[in-house]
Amino acid sequence: MCGIVGYTGPRQAAPLLLEGLKRLEYRGYDSAGIALVDAGRIEVHKAPGKIGVLEKQLGASLPTGHCGIAHTRWATHGAPNTVNAHPHTDCGGTLALIHNGIIENAGVLRTVLVQRGHVFRSETDTEVLAHLIEEVLGKGGTLVEAVAGALNQVEGTYGIAVISTREPDTLVAARKGSPLLVAIGSGENFVASDASAVLAHTRSVVYLDDGEIAVVRPGDYRILDLGTVEKEKAVTRVDWDLATIERGGHAHFMLKEIMEQPESLRNTLRGRLLEEEGTARLGGLNLTDEQLLLVNRIVFTACGTSWHAALIGEYMMEELARIPSEVEYASEFRYRNPIVDERTLVVGISQSGETADTLAALREAKRRGARTLGLVNVVGSTIAREVDGGIYVHAGPEIGVASTKAFTSQIAALALLTLKMGRLRALSILQGREVVRSLAKLPELVERVLAKAPEVERIAERMMRAANVLYLGRGYNFPVALEGALKLKEISYIHAEGYPAAEMKHGPIALIDDLMPVVFIAPKDAVYQKVVSNIEEVKARGGRVMAVVTEGDTGVTRLADHKVEVPETLDLLTPVLTVLPLQLLAYYIAVRRGCNVDQPRNLAKSVTVE
C-alpha cells in the first residue's frame, strides 16, 4: 500500500517524481524518499513523515538526473524513520530500490547475505532485495536478469522499481501481489503504483500482472516474465482526467467525495436500469441467465467499508432473490477451508480492486471451482482482471482514505445485482419496476440529504468532545451503524462501536450515561417500532440520542436530542441515505478536533499487504 513512482526521459526527474508522490500520498505517509542516477552515481534523499518534510529537506536545489524513483511509505517492517525509509541501496551504492509488499523469507535471506559480507543499514525486509540483486548482478548479466534472479529467490509480495548506475537510463519494475503499471509518454516513460501519479503526463498505461517484469527506457519498454521471456501486453487508456483527483475548492478530499455522491450514484446506475422489464442490464457479469439460475448460494467477501456494503448485499439478496447468502471477511476466508463449489457464486468487493485479502479469497474460491465476480471501482485493477466477470461501480477516483462515495455506489451496484438475480427467480415484474424507479430517484434524494450538512455540522459541535459513541441500527441499517462507527474511529480517533439495536441489552447498555452519545439509525422501515423501543431504553438511562429519521417522523423526534431527516425510499435502499449524515458527522467532528481528515494516522487507502 506504499506509493511508487519512477521516471526515465529527457526531463529532470526530481520535480516529476515529487509531483507523483504527492498524488500517491494517500497510499502511505509514514516517510518518503527519492533516488536519481546522475553522473555515474546514485543520489538518495529520505525523510520521515509526509512528503512535505522531504520537500523541505531538498529545498529549492533539487537533485539532478533524468532517471529516478520515489516512494511514500506505509510502514510494515521497521519504524517509520529516515533509515527505514525507501529507497534502499546495495553495499556499493550502485543501485537503489523501492518496494511495496512484504518479503516473507527476508530473515533467512538476510542471514545468508550477512554471512557473505553484505552490510545492512535498516530493519526493513526491502533492503534484502537490494542486496540480493547486488549479489546476482555481481555474477554478470543485465539489470533485468539480476532482478529476475533475485525475485526467483524470494517469498511474499512485491511491487518494486529499481535503478542502477550500470544502466543509467533504465527502470526495472516487477510485481507480485502489489499493483504496478507502466505509463507510456512521448519520448519518456513512467512506472507507478496507480495512474493518479502520472495522469498529468499520459493516460496510456500497461498494467503488470503477477510474475511480470518491465524494462523501461525513455524511448521504449518491454514486458517479460520471471524467466525473462518477452510478452505482449495491451495498452489501456485511463478514462478519467486530472481534475477528478483534485479537491475542487473543498477543504478536504473526503468532503469533496461526500458531496460527489449524487453524481457517483448516477454513474453507477447509468445505462443499467430497465424499467419496462423491471430488471438491470449487467453485461460485465459474463454469465448467461441459465448459468445464474444454477447458482444456489452466494458468498460475499470483502474488508472494511466494503464488508459493510457486503452485509447489505446479503440482506438484499436473501429478501428479493431468495438465494442463501453469507458474508465473509476476506482475511479469514482462505484460511477457513471454505465450502464452495461450482454452484457457489463468490462476489469480491473492493474499492481499489487491489485489496490483498480480497484478491486472495477470490483466487481460493476459483481454485475450489466457484464462479467469481468482482465489484470494484478501479478499471484495470487486479481483481477486475482475474475474476470471471463483475460490475464496475464507476464512482470515480476516491482519494480520501475513509471511503464514502464508493460505499454508496457499492450498495447501488449490489441492488442492481440483486434485481437481476431476483427477476430470474421470485421477484415479480411489478416489484422489479418499483425497485428500478426507486433506484432512479436515489441521486436526487441524496442531494436533499447533503443539503442538510449545516445541521450535521451543528450536531458535530455538540458531540466532538465525546470519548465513546455507540451506533445502533436494525435490519438494513445495522451495517450502516457499523459503517458510521468505523468512519468516526478512522478520522476522529474517537472510540465508537456499531451494534444491532437489540443487542444493546446484551452488554453495551452498561456503558450508557449522560456523557455517551448514542446514534440511532431509525428510518420508518419494517423494524421502526422496535428501534423506537430501543431509544426509549437509552433515554431511560440518561443517554444522549442523535437519530437519523425519515422526514416527518414524530415517534423518534420526540425522544431524540438531535435528529437529521432523510427522505423515504424502499427499505433496502435506505442505507444509501442514512449513511450520509454519519459520513458528515465523522467529517465535521474530525475537523473540529484538528485531525488530518484525508490522511488519518496509521491508515492507507489501499491495503495491498496481509
Image: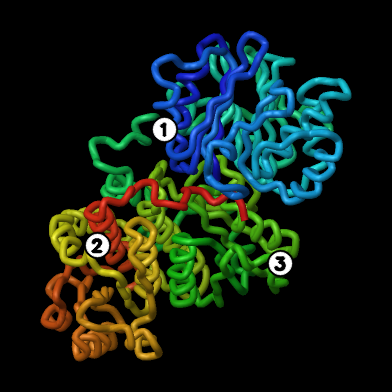
Q: CA distance from mark 2 to mark 3?
A: 41 Å
Density class for disc 3 (Cα within 10 Å; few <14, some 14-19, many ≥20) is some
Of circles 2 and 1, the one toward us is 1
Q: Three-letter amino acid code at disc 3?
A: Glu
Q: Nearer the viewer, residue 26 or 416?
A: 26
Quadrant containing the N terminus in the rendered view: top right
CA gap between label 2 and label 1 equals 35 Å
Q: Quadrant of the C terminus?
A: bottom right
**According to the image, label 2 marks what residue?**
581
Crowd rating for badge 1 (residues with CA inside 10 Å; few <14, some 14–19, many 20+) = some
Residue at mark 1 = 53
Q: Give the mark, 2 or 3, whose residue is nearer the N terminus.
A: 3
| SS at circle 2 | helix
Residue in view at x 19 percent, y 78 percent: 544
- Disc 1 to disc 3, how far (Cα)? 53 Å
**Which element is circle 1 on?**
helix
Disc 1 residue type?
Answer: Val
Front disc: 2 or 3? 2
Q: Residue beneath label 3, please?
A: 342
Vertical position of residue 392 compared to residue 82: above or below: below
Residue 411, labelled with which disc? none
Disc on the earlier residue, 1 or 3: 1
Residue 146 lies, in percent from the top left, at 80, 28
For mark 2, does the 10 Å Cα neighbourhood hold few (<14), some (14 to 19), or many (20 or more) residues? Answer: many
Instruction: Locate residue 221, reporting x and y percent.
Output: 67, 20
